[in-house]
Amino acid sequence: MSAPLAHHQIDARTTTHDHVVKAHADVAPGEIAVGVVVGRMSEYFDFFVYGIASALVFPAVFFPFADRLTGTLYSFAVFALAFLARPIGTVAFMAIQARWGRGAKLTIALFLLGTATAGIAFLPGYAAIGAASITLLAFFRVVQGVALGGSWDGLPSLLALHTPKPRRGWYAMLGQLGAPLGFIVAASVFAFIYASLEERDFLAWGWRYPFYVAFAINVVALFARLRLVVAEEYQSSMERLELAPTPVLELFRAKGPHVVIGAFAALASYALFHIVTIFPLSWLLLFGGRSIVDLLLVQVFGAFVAAVGVVVSGLIADRIGRARTLGSLAVAIAMFSGFAPTLMEAGRLGQDTFIVLGFALLGLSYGQAAGTVTANFGQRYRYTGAALTSDLAWLIGAAFAPLVALALCARFGLEWLGVYLLSGAVATLGALVLNRRLRYKS
């Protein structure tokens, strides 16, 4: 009796295993990866179009009553509003998804993002309508932040759960690849327009074209992402893996420490993010006397280096582990912070070295910055936990980086640039050590 029974149990287990494999096979990691890259690239293009304009355009167009430094600081204060609004958008759109579904949520979020972006493109400057232009700019920036929070589709988490554990570092970097690719396109568009126009024409109307392009890219990205998130096999896979919204209060009661640790674990990378992209544009425009087109092209080259770094980070993480990769890069960023001010003061060669080396470190670290400790959430809380962890990391590490760095360096000297980067590296290392000591999964 025992042999036939054992044989029957083996057959049952084999049948169950085959069913699970087939169910997972219906959701191809490669197809998810394409959706993740397209979605993130479109978001980051919007992100950098606004960021570059906040350094090059908005001080003159919306804050002409202030000197250039003060106007830039005002512009960066408005820039930060989106990051303050982003967690609000995440929570609000989680409720929309729970009520009307993931497809409706994504459609509304990207419609809002496109509308806000187009609204900025058509916005009159301070010379035309006075302070109302600043109010409208701030309003559209807040809407952008709410929409970005609402655009979380869970595809990175779905991708992570459908890949073998030894390859998760590789697949995790794919979504992060959208950042350098988005910057390459955004900076290239601005460089082309800036080189093609007189500065007067650029400030009058030329700067608006990248925002039109951003709106068009949003439309294409919406259909590309909807094709995935509303497909029956993806919906069923997300339901099976419990990738659905959970109440925020419940999340923080059950997994609050994980949210905080996850946000601080990414801080070294997020602090570096705007220091090599937005800060050099403002600083060198104000104090460096550099050609804007020349500077943007150096940054485009740096972004290509960062894209390579993101890819390499996946290979490294699969070999030594994601948390160890992130910690090692935090140490490297801490070392970089020691001579970053010297490079920025060393003329064109030093500035270019700062930008390219900074982008290289950004790619290597940012490639594994998202989701390194999201396994701590388990299945039930992973969807909402990953979204809010990312929102808080952006808020703490990147939202005020251009504003704080420019204000400190203008007032006290470039040494404070190194202090800012070092603080992010220390925060990452502290979070990773705490994660390890508390025996959380990583």
Image: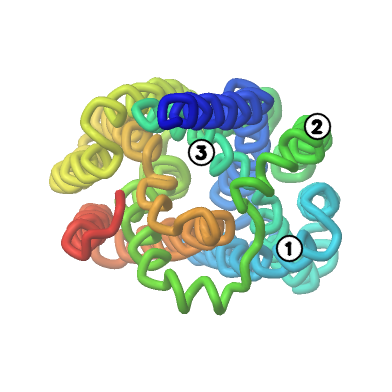
Among numbered discs 3 and 2, the one appearing first in the sequence: 3
Residue 23: x percent and y percent?
A: 65, 30
**Color scheme of the displayed model:** rainbow
Res. 98 image quadrant: bottom right
Which residue is denoted by mark 1 in the rendering? 93
Q: Which residue is drawn at 43% across and 28% down?
A: 164
Circle 3 — which element? helix
Q: Is residue 289 left or right of residue 351?
A: right
Q: Element under label 2?
A: helix
Q: Can residue 271 be seen in this view?
A: yes
How many numbered discs, if any?
3
Amino acid type assigned to the residue bearing label 3 in the image: Leu
Tell me the residue that label 3 is attached to.
161
Point out the frontmost of discs 3 and 2: 3
Evaluate if marks 1 and 3 touch, with contact meaning CB atoms under 8 Å apart.
no
Q: Where the N terminus falls, by quadrant?
A: top left
Q: Tell me how far mark 1 sits from mark 3, CA to CA.
A: 23 Å
How far is the residue under mark 3 from the one under mark 2?
Answer: 20 Å
Question: Disc 2 designates what residue?
Answer: 227
Q: Of the residues shown, which amino acid type is indicated by label 2?
A: Arg
Q: Nearer the viewer, residue 397 or 186?
A: 397
Q: Is mark 1 on a helix, strand or loop?
A: helix
| C-alpha span from label 2 to label 1 | 19 Å
Q: Is residue 46 left or right of residue 393?
A: right
Q: Which amino acid does label 1 sit on?
A: Phe
Which of the two discs, 2 and 1, labels the residue nearer the N terminus?
A: 1
**Closest to the observer: 225 or 298?**
225
Rendered image: mark on residue 416:
none
Residue with the most extreme front position: 1
Q: Residues within 10 Å of mark 1 (few under 14, many from 20)?
A: many
